[in-house]
Amino acid sequence: MYATRLSRRLLHLIPICILALLMAACSSATYSSSSDAHTSATTGQNTGTGASADASSGTGASAEANAGPGSSADADAGPGASADASAGTGASAEANAGPGASADANAGPGASADANAGGNSTMLSVKFACSSTKDGIQVSDTQAKVCVKTSPGANLRLEMRFCEGSLDPSRALQGTVKADANGFYQWIWKPQADCNGQSIWSYKATVRAELNGHKATAEAAKANP
């Protein structure tokens, strides 16, 4: 009789144990899924006054942190991702992004903002182009025009050689100039060409760009028949 009662009690406990095991398995799977998604989804964090927000994400993901007045926001994103940090009055915002990514930090009054983007975001390039790459250099006996496109604020120097290969000493080509907010600059001048009194039959243009320690050079040459 006692054994029969014990067996019945054990039979009642079996469904409860199975249910408990199923709940534990579901909880573990949800946590694992959430952790895996951390490397490919957006990570966001928002906090109120006097608190700090810190968001970090892995490769191909974005990190965003927003903090209220008197607090700090810090966002760190991996390669190929973007980092965005925003902080309120009297706070600091810092965003750090990996190679090939963008960083954006915004801080309110009395605060500081620091954005650092790595990898390809710091590369400098320069090319000859006015309205297109086909019209970047236009030369005649009475006027020469050279346009370049590069990073905004880049320092530029142009060297022009005509015919026999001597540098054009024109005043318009002396010294260093700076690209505008769109990364554009153009030189227009009357060439002083060493072509032995003949029409200009060839030229070689070299433009050198420099910005924050990075350098880039573009060259183009043409010989008229």
Image (cartoon, grey):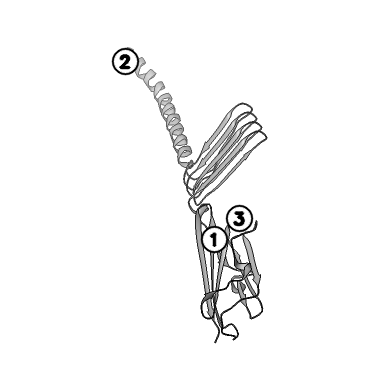
The residue tagged with tag 3: helix, strand or loop?
loop
Task: Determine the CA span between mark 3 and mark 2.
Answer: 90 Å
Q: Nearer the viewer, mark 1 or mark 2?
A: 1
| Residue 1 seen in render | no
Callout 2 amino acid: Ala
| Position of the N terminus by quadrant | top left
First in sequence, mark 1 or 2: give its number.
Answer: 2
Q: Nearer the viewer, residue 102 or 40?
A: 102
Callout 3 amino acid: Gly
Question: Residues at badges 1 and 2 in contact (C-beta under 8 Å)?
Answer: no
Callout count: 3
Residue density around tag 3, few if under 14, some if 14–19, many if 20 or more, within 10 Å: some
Spot occupied by residue 4 in the image (x, y as percentages of width and height)? 34, 16
Residue density around tag 1, few if under 14, some if 14–19, many if 20 or more, within 10 Å: many
Q: Nearer the viewer, mark 3 or mark 2?
A: 3
First in sequence, mark 3 or 1: give its number.
Answer: 3
The residue tagged with tag 1: helix, strand or loop?
strand
Left or right for 126, reference 69? left
Write down the residue under mark 1.
209
Question: Residues at badges 3 and 1 in contact (C-beta under 8 Å)?
Answer: no
Location of residue 2 with respect to 181 vertically, above or below:
above
Spot occupied by residue 141 in the image (x, y as percentages of width and height)? 64, 81
Location of residue 159 with respect to 105 vertically, above or below:
below
Write down the residue under mark 2.
3
Left or right for 24, reference 201? left
Point out which mark residue 153 bears. Answer: 3
The residue tagged with tag 2: helix, strand or loop?
helix
Question: Residues at badges 3 and 2 in contact (C-beta under 8 Å)?
Answer: no
Callout 1 amino acid: Ala
| Residue 92 seen in render | yes
Residue visible at 59% across and 37% down in the picture: 93
